[in-house]
Amino acid sequence: MKKWFGGLLAGLLFSLSAWAAVDINTATQSELEAVKGIGPAKAKAIVEHRQKSGPFKSVDDLPAAKK
């Protein structure tokens, strides 16, 4: 029973981490790369744009961070 409960708990924690939000204004390049659809080049561009121009005000500002 303990083994079954441990497996259930581990599965639940893993599934919750998959839904965790990433803050584009504080995320590291590696954290951004973990987001589906963001590769190393785009993650690097986001971090560099944020460092030069300051925080993003909305997700609509992301196209300004070009590869």
Image (cartoon, rainbow, N blue to C red):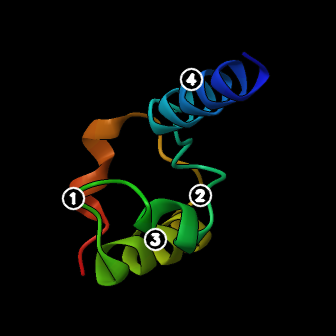
Q: Under tag 1, what secondary structure?
A: loop
* Distance from the alpha carbon under mark 3 to that under mark 2: 7 Å
Kind of residue at badge 3? His
Camera-nearest residue between 61 and 28: 28
- Which residue carries the number 1 mark? 37
Q: Nearer the viewer, mark 4 or mark 1?
A: 4
Q: How many marks?
A: 4
Q: Nearer the viewer, mark 4 or mark 2?
A: 4
Q: Nearer the viewer, mark 1 or mark 3?
A: 1
Mark 1 burial class by Cα count in 10 Å: few <14, some 14-19, many 20+: few
* Distance from the alpha carbon under mark 2 to that under mark 1: 23 Å
- Numbered circle sitting on residue 60: none
- Which residue carries the number 2 mark? 54
Task: Give the mark, 4 or 3, whose residue is nearer the N terminus.
Answer: 4
Residue 18 relative to residue 42: left or right? right
Camera-nearest residue between 28 and 66: 28
Kind of residue at badge 4? Leu
* Distance from the alpha carbon under mark 4 to that under mark 1: 24 Å
Q: Under tag 3, what secondary structure?
A: helix
Q: Position of residue 1 (x, y in %)?
A: 72, 15
